[in-house]
Structures are given as structure tokens and as C-alpha cells.
Image (spheres, rainbow, N blue to C red):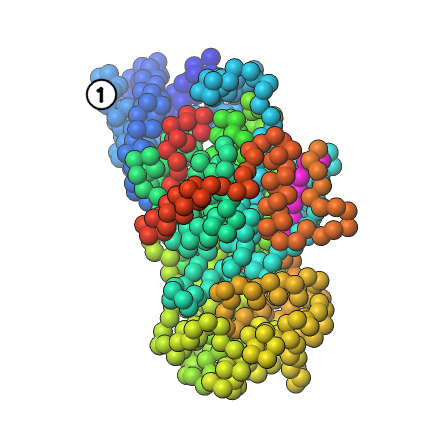
Amino acid sequence: MRVVVVWAVSTLTMMALAGILPDFQLKSAGGDSVTRVALTAAWGAGAFGLLSALVWPLVVRAFLLVPALVLGLLVFFLNGSLLLIALSLIPSGRGAAKPETAVVVAAVMSAVASATSTALAVRDDNAYRRRLSRLADRRRRRRGDDDRGSEPPGTVFLQLDGVGHDVLCHAVGAGLMPTVEGWLKETHLLTPWRTDWSSQTGASQLGILHGCTFDVPAFRWYEKDTGELMVSNRPASAVELQRRAIERTGDGGLLTVDGASRGNLFSGGADQLALVLSMAARRGRRNRSRAGYFAYFSDPANSVRTALSFVAEVGREIGQSTRARLRGDTPRVRRGGLYPFIRAFATVVERDVVVAAVIGDMLAGRTAVYADLVAYDEVAHHSGPRSRDADKVLDRLDRSLALIAKVAEHAPRAYRIVLLSDHGQSPGETFAGAYGLTLKDLVRAGCGLSVPRGAERTKSGAEARDAVRVALHRPVMENGEPGPASDPIVLASGNLGLVSFPDTEGRLAREEIDRRHPALLRTLAGHPGIGFLLVRSEEHGAVVIGGAGTDRIHEVPLAELADGKGPLTGFAPGAADAVRRTDTFPHTADIMVNSMYDPVTGEVHAFEEQIGSHGGLGGEQGHPFLLWPRDLSAPVADGTELVGAEQVHRVLRRWLRECAGPEVPLEISRHQAESRLQEESRRRQEAEGSFPVDDRAVQDKSA
């Protein structure tokens, strides 16, 4: 009956479009009766529906090797081509349309058919349950498990990238996230947790998924021993970071057994992968480039809906940025160029594909799923973490959570949903905007080197920007590439800066820095936009220096560093331990620079083009959240603070055991470890930039 209704609605839609569009005809030159036109439309709608159902998946598979965003743009033209073929199948040649008109007609018909089918399915719960039951039965037959009640609950971990604990509480209190509000009232509990000094996705997600944040000092850093610039969202760097984590822990990851990783920087040891950066280098018959988009784009209605939403989001960003400029909002950063398209990719394309993949995993009954939704993080970087633009993104993300929760009610096994974030964001004007020069300019001035006129722009390092470049098969570009051997390399990770001297081995001591550049450390520590510095010392092992624009420079040996005193005045408890831990990393920079922090306003100064930033210490960026079902054990004992992504990893593993989920091995055999390390090394060497997926996910129709 649903098929008949959808066919009838599609027929009426085609007749209406034929009456509206002058270049779309459904009758002969001499004219036809309404009945004849209706029969012609029924022919065309039926043929188009059959082609969409049978031919479209094959067409999408044929185009999987093209860049992902190009595939999204091709959706319109491919759909229009199918309509032209459908019109050619109408008897007596009564169907005709110009190619550009066919694109419009096909888009409208796909959207209408999808909306009609969805509405009918929603109103028919029995049919929906029967479909889910069939999908579950297929999976049980594949696994040889005939006992429907034998499977324990699964777990879905949903990461809201960049959403701090206080931001979530504000959104719930303002009614922006009714789904989360309902969870908090009935089924879930909420607690903040504290990041390390490096409060960014690379460190936090590596710790959450692989249980290790060691030697990840920032989002990007320079390694003297290899001469390489490591960037957390470069495929080659992500592969290497994952390899190091596996080598250090001897642990495959949180998702080792029957797990799925969706939209993450790292795999977590999962077999089922989509949009996972560290796996972007994999090649082979079982893992084709762009296959991560197959399950979603194989439905032409999904493709059209996402493409239309993409265009609408571009228009929304242009309108919002224009209004902000006319209102004279401050602080403000540039939002032109390609940014509207980058934002649309993060808030529409990536969101839709990741949510669809998670739904597919739940319908397939997978045991553990971890997915990252980056929409808020991208918008908050450019509009501010408490802006109206960011609030609207939270509202749309809540709808995605509601959809996933609804699917969980009908999935073939029970699911516990854990919501968490990897870091927050702290507001504030950029360092360059506040002082008219970049951190690189200040370092060069302190070294007595030439400084270019005008503040050189430091590009934003938001995750979505380079995700788009990877999706387009474009290399990830970075500021801070080595110049002359004697020049310092200055890198930015939010409000955390790193200064390295590439012509020396190991970390340069404070005494040697003073001999080479007598004014550098005092210039940095005395600047009002700098909070404190960490440098190695021959006498004290390491020292923390700070002045924040005052005449008096505080210099404290690292062993004597205390929270809220000296250079750390105003910073939250735990800052001293975070600095001490970073000092133990082999690839900590010669000079680690943390911007100023105003504890009254919560503001910091990002060394990048971001008015909402994260990466260092200060404010809400270091306080993400963890929201979990009440029937799971508490993350930590009462009165104890949850500190560091590694501890979060241990909590999530415990919850998986409580759900009788995958028992992640604490250790693996030497043979397994060597095999994994060799595989990760090979992937790193082949890294080019793509978002693949395990072919088993492509073959699984339930996805």
C-alpha cells in the first residue's frame, strides 16, 4: 500500500511540475486529455522509481573513486540523468525535458517521495518493527544466533565535539536541547571532566579511544628527531599517533570487538569504519576510497536532501556573517572565502553521513559504536561558543540525538546511549586582533629577526577545514613549515603556542635560549597577551615563567609550581599537574606558550583565527562533559574529579564490561602487536587523504 501511495504522490508531483515548468512536457504536441497526461505521468514516475531503486546504487558505486564532495554535487546531475532515461521509456514519446529542467524535476520528485515514504513509515509502527525484525534476523542468521534474547545491550558513544559542560547546561536550561533535557530528568546523569594541557580533539580522542595521550603536546607540533611537522588531523600523522598509542598500551582500542568508528580521527580498533582519518590511507579490494559514503548516497532521496540542506546552510552562514558585520559584533573573524562551504560540510554532510552510519550500526545490532559530530565545534570557532549561530547548531544536533534514540527503541537489541565531549571552547578576541601582531611576529621580534609589516594571518586549525581538504583529495596545508635553519618554528593550537629551534637537538635549555636570544623569554613573558611559558632549565630541570604584562616576571621551578599562584594565578586547579605532565613528553617544544586567561570573563587569546578556541589552559575549553545512563556505575567515586582522557577511556571500558560488551584485552600477543604496528606503518607511508570504510559495511544492507 505504501508503494502505491508513494507512486500516486510522485505521479501528481510530476503532473504539477509539468504544468509549472515550460521545458517539461508530458503530452504530445497536439495535446492530450487529463487522463492521458495522468497515465503518462504514472509511467514516468514508475520508471523513475524503479531506476532509482535498482540502478542508483550501481551508479553511486561506480563514482566512489571521485572526491566525496564532488560526489555530493554530482547527485543532482546523476538523478536528472535517471529521469531523462525514465522519460524515454514512456510510450509514444510523450515525456520530454531539457537536461537542466530534468535535474530540478528529479530533485523535487526524490524529495517528495522520500518525505511521503517516511511519513507513512512513521505512522505505521508495525511495518517499521517488521522491517527492523527482518534486518535483525538477517544478522542473526549470518552469526548463527537464533536466540533473539541472547544478546546483551549494546552501547553507543556520541561525541559532541567542542561542547563544554557549561555550554551543555546552558543549552538544556534554555530549551535548546529537549532530548538531552529529557534524558537528564529521567534516565541519565551528568558530570564534567578535565582535559590535559592539550585540550583538543587529537589528544582527547586518542586518549578516549586508545587509552593514551602521551607525547601529544598540542594539535600540531614539530619533531626535531625526524624533522616532521605533526598535525592531528593529517592522515599520516593520525596513523602515526594511533600506532604509537597501540605500541605504548599494547591495546587495540575501545572498539576492538564488534565495534564501529564513525567520523573520528582514530579507529579505536574497530572493524567497521566510516570517515575515520587514521584509516584514510588504506587501499585494497576490500577497502575502496569513498566507500564510506556508499550506504548514505545509495539512496537518491538522501543525496538530494543533503545537497539541498548543504546549499541552505551555505546561505544561512552568509546571512549570519553579514548580519554580524552590519551589527558590528565584536570580537569577529573573517568568515568569507571557502568557509561557508566548510561549515556546510561539517554541519550537514558529515552530520548526515555519521548519523546514518550510527543508525545502520544499531539496526545491525553492533555491540559498541563511537561517533563524532563536529558541527558545533566548527561554528563556535568562528561565531563564538555562546553565539546564536552556535545555539542553533545545538538545536539541530539535539534532533539528531532524538532520531538515534528513536531508532534505539526499535533496534534488535537494547542500547545504552552515552553522550560526551572531548573538550570545550573558551571565548575571546584573537591575539592578532587584540595586539596587532601574531605570536610568530612577537617571537621574531624577541629574536631580533625581521618582522613583516601588518599582522600575518594565522589560519584556523579547526578539524572540519582539513576534513574537507581530505575529502577533496587535497593536501593539508599548514603554517609553520620550516624556513631557514636558524629561524624558530612557531605553531599555534588555539591559545597554546609552540616555539621550536630546528637547528638544535633535543629541547633547548633556558640558559641556551638566553645566550642565543637574550630578549626572547622576557619579551614573551612580559607581554600582556601571554599567560606563562614552560622551558627546560639546566639548573631546575624545567621552569615556568609568567608576567602577564606586569613589570615583575615570575619564574618558578616546575617542581615548586602550585595551582593559583605565581605564573598560574587565575588558572583553575589541576593546571600545575597538567604542565608537569606535558614536560615529560619527548616532543614538547623548546618554549610552550599559553595565552593570558581572564578568570572573570573566561576569555583567552587564540593564536589562530578563532574567537572560540581550545588547545591550552584557561576557561571552559578544559571542561568537557560526560552524560551516562543511571543503570551504569558512576565514573568516579563521590567527590573525586574525572581527570584526563585516559581515565575517561578506562571508565568507558568498564561500562562496556558492565553491558557484557566486548572484553577489550589489556594485552595482546607480541605477534599481534608486531603485525598491527607493521600495518599502521604501511598505512602511514601510503597516506594520501581520503575517508574509507571497511567493505563489510558496504556489503551490509542494513547500513
Quarter assignment of residue 194 = bottom right
Q: Who is closer to the viewer here, 72 or 119?
A: 72
Q: Residue at x 46, y 71 (%)?
A: 506
Expressed as whole percent of the image width and height from the top left, the position of residue 596 reads 62, 71
Residue at the far front in the pictured view: 670
**Mark 1 residue crowding within 10 angstroms, few (<14) / some (14–19) / many (20+):** few
Q: Is residue 143 above or below residue 453?
A: above
What segment is highlighted magenta in the picture?
A: 624-630
Q: Residue at x 54, y 31 (%)?
A: 367
Expressed as whole percent of the image width and height from the top left, the position of residue 151 reads 57, 23
Instruction: Please identify the dominant SS of the magenta region.
Output: strand
| Amino acid type of the residue tagged 1 in the rendering | Gly
Q: Is residue 224 above or below residue 157?
A: below
Quadrant for the C terminus, please: top left
Quarter assignment of residue 401 = top right
Q: Mark 1 = which residue?
A: 93
Q: Residue at x 43, y 41 (%)?
A: 672
